[in-house]
Image (spheres, rainbow, N blue to C red):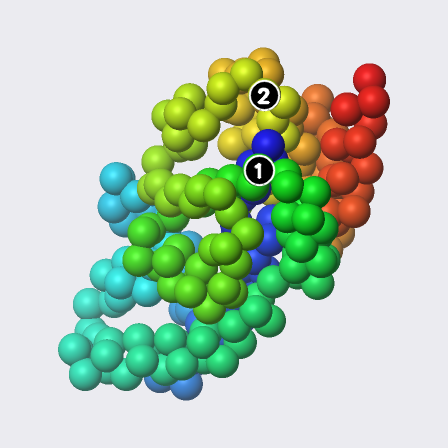
């Protein structure tokens, strides 16, 4: 069984942020205002700390009327649908096809706001590859407790703290950290791969040990 994270692991979230930036700037924000309000929006609601949605982003603005919000939301959705599978890293579809042929059980666990993550899943059209998809605004530990049942499990994620938490709570899960596009590599006692090919090399080496 292989457990995948979505954002920055399969889905190029930086590209999505650039698309959002384009729409917000068209509606009068400066570049700096866009990035500072985006960062602020992650933490405005304690129950969804660390998660983004367009609705949360709007909560940062006191002077946006409903008409402007609607326009931004419509234009954002249009741009996201147009990009579609263009948000996926190039190695994702070939890798998932290969794994599906090998009858590997695949699970997707994504931290985020349900409606926004579902929008991403709608446009990338990957649902059929996964035996099960979970979305949670909190940490992933409770979900992992339900999906683990003694078989060898690999967890692929770009988020070092999440991987560390998984390793601590589930000694039977082997974590592999993925750091795309030359992202900084944290000093961590977990193998680090820069793409899915390297991830599968690690998985093979675990399996042959
Ligand atoms: Mg991620």
Q: Is residue 139 above or below residue 64?
A: above
| Location of residue 164 by image quarter | top right
Q: Which of marks 1 and 2 is nearer the N terminus?
A: 1
- Numbered disc 1: secondary structure: loop
Split into 4 quadrants, where in the image is the C terminus? top right
Q: Nearer the viewer, residue 104 or 42?
A: 104
Question: Viewed as shown, does residue 104 lie left or right of 21?
Answer: right
Quarter of the figure with residue 33 = bottom left
> According to the image, label 2 marks what residue?
151
Residue drawn at point x = 38 percent, y = 63 percent: 119
Q: Residue 130 carries which label?
A: none
Distance between the alpha carbons at the discs numbered 1 and 2: 11 Å
Please name the residue shown 42% across and 22% down the image: 145
Is residue 31 visible in this depiction of the protein? no
Q: Nearer the viewer, residue 172 or 167?
A: 172
Tell me if mark 1 has few (under 14), some (14-19) or many (20+) residues whose alpha carbon lies within 10 angstroms of its own: some
**What residue is shown at x 53% (from left), y 76% (from top)?**
83
Q: Are marks 1 and 2 in contact (CB under 8 Å)?
A: yes
From the viewer's perspective, tell me whether residue 206 is left or right of residue 54. right
**Residue sticking out furthest to the left:** 66
- 120 sits to left or right of 18: left
Task: Between residue 20 and residue 37, name the one nearer to us.
Answer: 20
Direction from residue 139 to residue 183 in the image, left or right: right
Placement of 156 over or under 142, stated as above or below:
below
Q: Position of residue 173 (x, y in %)?
A: 59, 22
In the rendered image, which residue does mark 1 sit on? 105
In what quadrant of the picture does the N terminus appear?
Answer: top right
Location of residue 158 in the rendering, given as x and y in whole percent from the top left corner: 61, 42
Residue beneath the point at 64% across and 48% down: 100
Residue 129 vertical position relative to residue 207 in the rendered view, above or below = below
Question: How many discs mark residues in the rendered view?
Answer: 2
């Amino acid at each position: 069984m292989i457990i995948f994270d979505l954002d920055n692991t399969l889905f190029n979230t930086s590209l999505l942020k650039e698309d959002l930036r384009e729409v917000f700037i068209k509606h009068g924000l400066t570049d700096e205002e866009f990035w500072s309000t985006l960062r602020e929006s992650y933490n405005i609601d304690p129950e969804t700390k660390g998660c983004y949605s367009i609705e949360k982003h709007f909560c940062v603005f006191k002077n946006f009327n409903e008409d402007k919000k609607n326009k931004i939301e419509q234009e954002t959705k249009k741009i996201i649908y147009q990009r579609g599978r263009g948000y996926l890293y190039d190695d994702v579809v070939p890798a998932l096809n290969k794994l599906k042929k090998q009858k590997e059980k695949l699970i997707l666990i994504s931290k985020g706001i349900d409606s926004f993550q579902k929008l991403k899943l709608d446009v990338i059209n990957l649902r059929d590859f996964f035996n099960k998809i979970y979305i949670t605004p909190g940490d992933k530990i409770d979900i992992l407790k339900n999906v683990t049942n003694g078989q060898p499990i690999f967890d692929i994620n770009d988020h070092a703290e999440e991987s560390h938490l998984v390793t601590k709570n589930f000694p039977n899960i082997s974590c592999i950290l993925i750091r795309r596009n030359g992202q900084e590599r944290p000093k961590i006692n977990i193998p680090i791969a820069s793409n899915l090919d390297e991830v599968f090399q690690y998985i093979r080496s675990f399996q042959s040990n």
